[in-house]
Amino acid sequence: MEYTAKAGDRWDTIAYRFLGDAKKTGLLVEKNPHLNVLEFSGGERIYIPDVIEEKPKEVETLPWL
């Protein structure tokens, strides 16, 4: 998916809006190496990756439990 930034947008606000977590900012920056800014002036095209939530690995129950 692509998003066109608005003036004042920041990586963390975009991550929160589209990925549900501002801590996923690094994922956005990694996928958009052509954008070397902290705050957008508006009009920049940002690639928003599809994020697949990883399920926690199942832990085998120990036989004595």
Image (cartoon, grey):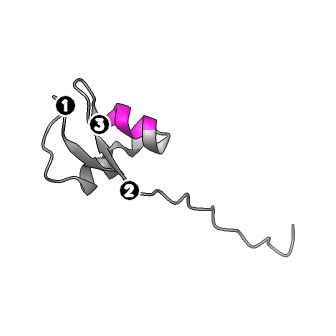
Residues in magenta? Answer: 11-17
Work out which quarter of the rendered image holds the N terminus and state it.
Answer: bottom left
Q: Is residue 16 magenta?
A: yes
Q: Is residue 15 left or right of residue 31?
A: right
> What amino acid type is highlighted by mark number 2?
Pro
The image quadrant of residue 55 is bottom right
Left or right: where 27 falls relative to 56: left
* Whole-percent x, y for residue 43 in the image: 19, 36
Q: Are marks 3 and 2 in contact (CB under 8 Å)?
A: no
Question: How many C-alpha atoms fall within 10 Å of the one at disc 2: few (<14), some, or many (≥20)?
Answer: some
Check residue 47 for magenta coloring. Answer: no
Question: Are the residues tagged 3 and 1 within 8 Å (C-beta)?
Answer: no
Tell me the SS state at disc 2.
loop
Q: CA distance from mark 3 to mark 2?
A: 13 Å
Question: How far is mark 2 from mark 1, CA to CA?
Answer: 20 Å
The residue indicated by pointer 3 is: 11
- Residue drawn at x 22%, y 52% is 32
Q: Mark 3 falls on what kind of element?
A: helix
Report the amino acid beneath label 3: Trp
Residue at the bottom extreme of this rendering: 63
| Left or right: where 36 falls relative to 48 | left
> Which percent across, then down, holds residue 13?
36, 31
Which residue position is annotated with label 2? Answer: 49
Q: Which residue is mark 1?
A: 42
The correct choice, above or below, for 37 with respect to 30 in the image is above
Q: Earlier in the sequence, mark 2 or mark 1?
A: 1
* Residue 22 can be seen in this image: no
